[in-house]
């Protein structure tokens, strides 16, 4: 089988024109991928995201005794969180004030005491699924700390400055980030899909590529309305006369209208004539009886390998393949490829087949 088109030089101009026609795929793919990412992110946050949590918070002011500089360094944020449940002077008072159903394990899991900026200002937070229980635990911790400040030799006092009721914790949902990521992935995926698809496209678009690929002349280019493109009508008439037998050259114009159906049972009666046939016609006996055969290749149909196999079969069957005919061509594509204006092209187009 002749697979020379697998190694043929890529026609960059024709490929770009085909890519340009499919650029609409990029925004569509970007929008679809963005929507998919948002749906996946929303589902993940709904099904696997954090449960509803309420946070209660209080502020306490620490007054150290004179000469307790080292103690001020020691009592940092991490130390206070540990002391809530580790120091009996604090934990015992917390247990006395905890609501029913809670213990020190609950406090250890939900309460945090931090020194954020000023070493004398402590922030206590409690997070719980029940807002009332969060407030009750916070109150127990605050009472224990105030009591500890009055009993400790290190502190002159620990005073409660303020307490905020429990409020729902609002998590940062990054739906916009998910949408932006989807847009980026979709646009990139759409572009590379178009690029790959058009690079691997083996369809016939311009006669020059067909001639390089199959090593046969392209007799003409038929448009979708049945007319010839540009000067290809003149080429077609000349080549038909050239390939016909001298005795039947005068009848060539009638032969141009011969049907190209797959099963041309009457083709045996056209001995000495040039006939046209579609790709896949296996009536080799009828095709061999002709002076020459022109194989019709549809425009833009991805069947390059199939055409190569067909031409190989025709050669093996001793069918005289004279040339090719590109059919159903897109005039706008050809105009863009050859940079031909509509007026100029209209003056060059000739009558139908």
Image (tube, rainbow, N blue to C red):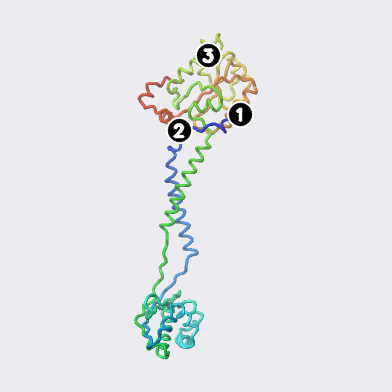
Q: Which residue matches tag 3?
A: 242
Assign a secondary structure to mark 1. Answer: loop
Q: Residue at x 46, y 56 (%)?
A: 39
The image shows residue 6 at horizontal and vertical percentages of 57, 33
Q: Residue at x 44, y 26 (%)?
A: 225
Choose between 19 and 269: the one closer to the eye. Answer: 19
Of pointers 1 and 2, the one earlier in the residue sequence: 1
The image shows residue 132 at horizontal and vertical percentages of 42, 78
Distance, label 3 to label 2, CA atoms, is: 32 Å
Crowd around label 2: few <14 · some 14–19 · many ≥20 (10 Å): few
Q: Is residue 111 left or right of residue 164?
A: right
Q: Residue furthest top?
A: 247
Which callout, 1 or 2, points to the residue nearer the camera?
2
Choose between 76 and 171: the one closer to the eye. Answer: 76
Q: Which residue matches tag 2?
A: 13
Choose between 206 and 146: the one closer to the eye. Answer: 146
Q: Are marks 1 and 2 in contact (CB under 8 Å)?
A: no
Distance, label 1 to label 2, CA atoms, is: 25 Å
The image shows residue 95 at horizontal and vertical percentages of 48, 86
> Taking 55 as reference, is 269 above or below it?
above
Of pointers 1 and 3, the one earlier in the residue sequence: 1
Q: Residue at x 50, y 64 (%)?
A: 48
Q: Which residue matches tag 1?
A: 2
Crowd around label 3: few <14 · some 14–19 · many ≥20 (10 Å): few
């Amino acid at each position: 089988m002749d697979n020379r088109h697998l190694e043929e030089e890529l026609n960059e101009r024709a490929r770009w024109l085909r890519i340009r026609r499919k650029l609409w795929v990029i925004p569509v793919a970007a929008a679809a991928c963005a929507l998919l990412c948002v749906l996946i992110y929303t589902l993940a946050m709904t099904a696997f995201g954090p449960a509803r949590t309420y946070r209660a918070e209080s502020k306490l002011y620490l007054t150290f005794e004179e000469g307790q500089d080292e103690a001020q360094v020691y009592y940092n944020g991490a130390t206070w969180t540990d002391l809530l449940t580790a120091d009996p002077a604090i934990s015992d008072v917390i247990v006395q004030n905890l609501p029913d159903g809670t213990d020190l394990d609950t406090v250890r899991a939900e309460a945090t005491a931090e020194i954020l900026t000023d070493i004398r200002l402590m922030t206590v937070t409690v997070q719980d699924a029940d807002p009332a229980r969060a407030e009750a635990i916070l109150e127990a911790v605050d009472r224990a700390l105030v009591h500890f400040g009055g009993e400790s030799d290190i502190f002159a006092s620990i005073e409660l400055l303020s307490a905020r009721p429990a409020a729902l914790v609002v998590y940062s949902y990054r739906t916009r980030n998910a949408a932006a990521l989807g847009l980026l992935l979709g646009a990139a995926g759409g572009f590379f899909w178009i690029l790959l698809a058009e690079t691997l496209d083996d369809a016939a678009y311009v006669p020059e590529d067909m001639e390089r690929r199959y090593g046969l002349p392209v007799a003409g280019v038929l448009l979708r309305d049945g007319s010839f493109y540009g000067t290809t009508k003149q080429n077609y008439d000349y080549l038909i006369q050239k390939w016909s037998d001298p005795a039947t050259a005068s009848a060539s114009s009638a032969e141009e209208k011969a049907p190209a159906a797959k099963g041309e049972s009457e083709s045996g009666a056209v001995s000495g004539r040039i006939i046209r046939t579609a790709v896949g016609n296996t009536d080799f006996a009828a095709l061999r009886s002709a002076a020459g055969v022109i194989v019709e290749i549809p425009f833009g149909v991805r069947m390059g390998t199939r055409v190569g196999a067909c031409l190989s079969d025709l050669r093996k069957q001793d069918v005289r393949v004279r040339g090719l005919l590109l059919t159903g061509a897109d005039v706008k594509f050809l105009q863009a490829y050859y940079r031909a204006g509509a007026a100029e092209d209209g003056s060059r187009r000739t009558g139908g087949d």
